[in-house]
Amino acid sequence: MKKTTPNSPQSPEPSAVDAIDITKLSNITEPLVSARLRNPNRPDPVSHVFTIIPNIDTESLLCHACETLASLNVMATDLACELEGSRRNVMLAIQQLAVLGELLVNRALDNLDPPGCVTEARP
């Protein structure tokens, strides 16, 4: 009986990243980055798709951070349940960091407005 050998591996198809002209991209970004390094007061050359209101209070920022970390905790826990071995351990470590961050943010909120204190309603 003749043993067949599998086809030799073919080179992978070029990805979309290979199609991008890196020099062209560098020519666009380099002046922006250089200008930022020369003048630290110049705003970062980033997209402002996601922005935070400039004068938002610290308590609101911490509340949103806490909710975001709680969501991350749930997602990481759900994903860890689907994984096995070292990947599961990595995901559980990420989940524990999310919980730690949530605890730190909650403590910061408690420091701003200790539980049991009566505060006036803000307009």
Image (cartoon, grey):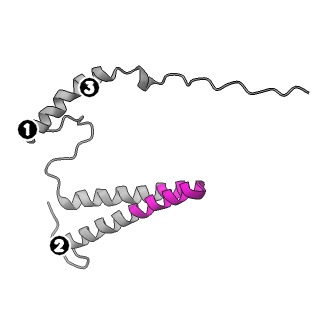
Q: Which residue is mark 3?
A: 26
Q: Position of residue 70 (x, y in %)?
A: 40, 60
Label of residue 29 in the image:
none
The type of residue carrying mark 2 is Thr
User: Foreground: 57 or 82?
Assistant: 82
Q: Position of residue 10 (x, y in %)?
A: 61, 23
Q: Is residue 120 above or below residue 36?
A: below
Task: Give the dominant element type of the magenta stretch: helix, strand or loop.
Answer: helix
Observer able to see residue 23: yes
Query: Could you tell me how far apart the alpha carbons at marks 1 and 3 are, in whole angstroms?
Result: 20 Å
Tell us which disc is closer to us: 3 or 2. 3
Residue at the spot x=64%, y=26% of the render? Answer: 9
Q: Is residue 37 left or right of residue 102?
A: left
Q: Which residue is mark 2?
A: 119
Q: Is residue 32 magenta?
A: no
Dot 2: element: loop
Residue at the spot x=36%, y=55% of the render? Answer: 68
Residue at the spot x=49%, y=61% of the render? Answer: 92
Q: Which residue is mark 1?
A: 39
Q: Is residue 91 magenta?
A: yes
Residues under numbered marks 3 and 2 in contact, where contact means CB atoms less than 8 Å apart: no
> What's drawn in magenta, residue-wise?
76-97
Among the two numbered marks 1 and 2 on one chain, the one whose residue lies closer to the N terminus: 1
Count neighbours of disc 1 (C-alpha within 10 A) and say few if under 14, some if 14 to 19, many if 20 or more.
Answer: few
Q: Position of residue 53 (x, y in %)?
A: 18, 47
The type of residue carrying mark 3 is Ser
